[in-house]
């Protein structure tokens, strides 16, 4: 490469570097602007958590959800904007429907679901959007009894099991929790599975509380709370064991 080409390459490098820096700065500046738009819930983190707990109590008591929470008037009310009071990271399991087990209506929960309630890049971006842009004051990571994804992670740890397609990659984030549970002595298989479910939730909550820059400031200021919970398939109760 001659001197002229070298100089041209350097100019192009610095031009792209500057554009990248400006792009990042622009994105950071854009987020507060987006967050400032639209109506936000007035609930505090503790009030949002209390609302979820009350919703689960109503679900257990078979109290029907008011029709007004999902009728045509409600649809029209939220058609142009949403004001969720909580972000919920849950499992894709068909038996664990957050709106049902928390007795909520349209537009109340911003839900991120995948097998094993893990938080990858896409899930994290969705979660951050719910907090930073939509203004949700509460994040709930919800595991559940007899989770198939967690059970699969345990089978990898204990039996060196392998799964087809992308299933193996999907359960990789759960393996550390499975390892912790499998090292405990005296646990029956169902107890070990439940321990792994809780450990999986615990690890995710700890990460969100301590390692995600976009959440640190609202957590520190008390505008946000991140909690962990476990849903019992048999009795329908949600146990908020990390608050």
Image (cartoon, rainbow, N blue to C red):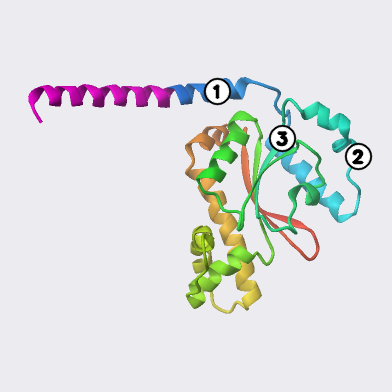
Question: Which residue: 73% across, 32% down?
Answer: 43
Rate crowding at label 1 as few (under 14), some (14 to 19) or many (20 or more) other CA atoms within 10 Å.
Answer: few
How packed mark 2 is, by other alpha carbons closer than 10 Å (few <14, some 14-19, many 20 or more), is few
Label 3 CA crowd tier, 10 Å (few <14, some 14–19, many 20+): many
| Helix, strand or loop at mark 2 | helix
Q: Which residue is mark 1?
A: 32
Q: Is residue 51 magenta?
A: no
Residues at badges 1 and 2 in contact (C-beta under 8 Å)? Answer: no
Label 1 – label 2 distance at C-alpha: 35 Å
Which residue is nearer to you in this view: 22 or 195?
A: 22
Task: Say if residue 116 shows up in the picture.
Answer: yes
Question: Which residue does the numbered mark 3 point to in the structure image?
Answer: 84
State left or right for residue 66 relative to residue 132: right
Q: Position of residue 46 (x, y in %)?
A: 71, 39
| Precedes in sequence: disc 3 or disc 1 | 1
Q: Secondary structure under badge 3?
A: loop
| Residue 11 sits inside the magenta stretch | yes
* Sequence-earlier tag: 1 or 2: 1
Please state the extent of the stretch shown in magenta in the rendering: 1-25
- Between the C-alphas of marks 3 and 1, the distance is 18 Å
- Residue 128 appears left or right of 26: right
Q: Residue at x 64, y 73 (%)?
A: 191
On screen, 140 above or below 10? below
What residue is at 87 percent from the left and 29 percent from the top? 73
Question: What residue is at 57 percent from the left and 53 percent from the top?
Answer: 118
Whether residues under marks 2 and 3 lie with C-beta atoms below 8 angstroms apart, the answer is: no
Res. 67 mark: 2
């Amino acid at each position: 490469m001659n001197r002229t080409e070298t100089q041209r390459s350097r100019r192009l490098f610095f031009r792209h570097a500057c554009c990248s820096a400006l792009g990042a700065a622009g994105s950071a500046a854009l987020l507060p602007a987006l967050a400032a738009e639209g109506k936000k819930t007035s609930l505090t983190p503790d009030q949002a958590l209390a609302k979820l707990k009350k919703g689960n109590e109503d679900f257990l008591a078979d109290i029907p959800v008011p029709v007004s929470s999902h009728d045509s008037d409600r649809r029209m009310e939220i058609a142009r904007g949403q004001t969720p009071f909580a972000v919920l990271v849950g499992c894709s399991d068909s038996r664990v429907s957050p709106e049902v087990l928390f007795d909520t209506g349209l537009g109340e929960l911003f839900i991120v679901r995948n097998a094993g309630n893990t938080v990858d890049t896409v899930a994290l971006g969705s979660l951050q959007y719910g907090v930073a842009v939509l203004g949700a004051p509460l994040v709930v990571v919800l595991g559940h009894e007899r989770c198939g994804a967690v059970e699969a992670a345990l089978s990898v740890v204990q039996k060196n099991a392998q799964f087809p397609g992308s299933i193996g990659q999907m359960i990789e984030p759960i393996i550390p929790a499975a390892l912790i549970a499998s090292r405990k002595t005296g646990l029956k298989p169902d107890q070990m599975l439940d321990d792994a479910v809780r450990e999986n939730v615990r690890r995710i909550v700890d990460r969100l509380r301590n390692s995600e820059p976009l959440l640190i400031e609202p957590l520190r200021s008390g505008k946000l709370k991140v909690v962990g919970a476990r849903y019992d398939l048999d009795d329908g109760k949600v146990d908020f064991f990390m608050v």
